[in-house]
Amino acid sequence: MRAVALLVVGLALVGCRTASRAVDEPRTVAAPPPAAHIGGYSRNGRAIGFEVHGDGPETIVLIAGIHGDEPAGGPLFDALSEHLRRDDACRTGRRIVLLARANPDGLAAGTRHNAAGVDLNRNFPAVNFRASSRHGPRPLSEPESCVLEALIETYAPSRVLSLHQPLACVDWDGDGEALARAMAAACDLPAKKLGGRPGSLGSWVSGDRSTPIITLELPKNASRLDAETLWDRYGNALRAFILHREAPKTATRIGDSRS
C-alpha cells in the first residue's frame, strides 16, 4: 500500500492546561480545537492520527515516534498541541501538521522497529535506500512509512521536524543549518551534523524533495520526564522551528566575481 487516504475523524480533543513559565508565552485568546485526522493504520491495526493547526499559507510538518523505543516525543507533542491553541504567533500565517506517534505498534512494545521488525526510518524512497530484512524489501513496504510519505506528499511542507532520541543534539539535512542553530540556541542541546542514513526520512525529504529537515534528538533520559517538564526544556526550541524565517539571500550583481 503506497497511497494512504487522509481521513477526517473529528475535532474532539481535551482542553488546555497551563504551560511552563520557562517557555515564551505571548498573550493570546484560545483558538478552537485543531482538526484531527487519521492518516492510516499500523501493521497491527492501530490508528496513526495527526492534527492540523492553523490554515496557512505556509505549511510545516512535525513528526515524532518513528522509533518505538524513543517515546518522549509523544508527551512533548501533546504539550505543543495545547500550546498551539494559545499561541497566535505560531498559528498566524501557517498551517502546522503535528503527528506525535508514527509507530504505535513499536511504542506499545517498546521496540525501535514496527511489528514486522522493520526500522521505519530506513524505509523511505530515498535514492540511498538499501533493501534488507531490517530496512524492508522495498521503499514504503510498511503501512506506517506510507502514512508519513502520503502526509508529506499531500501537505508539501516548507520544512519538516523529526523528533528522536537519544543523541542529544539538533541535527539537520539539506538547507537547515541556520534553523538548527536557532533551535539549539533556544535549548540546552548543541547543533550537530550527523549525516544522512540509507532510506531515512531525512535523506528522502532533504535529498529527493529538496526540503530542509531538522532532527531534534532528545537525550535518553527524556523518556522519564513528564509532558510539562519536556515542554519546559524543549518548548522554546519547537517554537523556534515553527517561527523561523530564513534570511533573504543576497543577489549577485553583474560583474561580481564569486569563485
Image: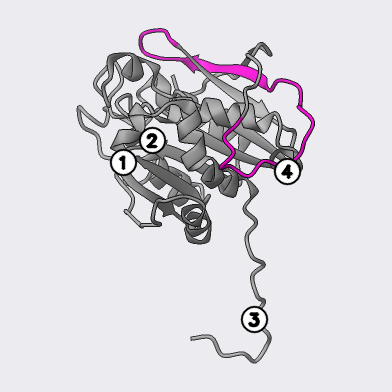
Q: Which amino acid type corresponds to the residue marked 2 in the rendered image?
A: Phe
Are the residues flagged by discs 1 and 2 in contact, CB closer than 8 Å? yes
Q: In the image, which is nearer the foreground, mark 3 or mark 4?
A: 4
Image spot of residue 158 (x, y percent): 61, 47
Residue 10 within the segment the image draws in magenta: no
Residue 37 within the segment the image draws in magenta: yes
Residue holding disc 4? 89
Q: What kind of element bears circle 3?
A: loop
- Tell me where the magenta segment starts and ends, as one range: 19-46
**What is the chief secondary structure element of the magenta stretch?**
loop
Label 3 Cα crowd, 10 Å radius (few <14 / some 14-19 / many 20+): few
Label 2 Cα crowd, 10 Å radius (few <14 / some 14-19 / many 20+): many
Are the residues flagged by discs 3 and 1 in contact, CB closer than 8 Å? no
Label 1 Cα crowd, 10 Å radius (few <14 / some 14-19 / many 20+): many
Residue holding disc 2? 124
**Residue at the image position 52 percent from the left and 61 percent from the top:** 178
Above or below 189: residue 224: above
| Distance in Å between CA atoms under marks 3 and 4 | 33 Å
Q: What kind of element bears circle 1?
A: loop
**Residue at the image position 64 percent from the left and 14 percent from the top:** 13
Residue holding disc 3? 252
Q: Quadrant of residue 136?
A: top left
Horizontally, is 23 left or right of 71 in the view?
Answer: right
- Label located before the other in sequence (1 or 2): 2
Image spot of residue 34 (x, y percent): 68, 23
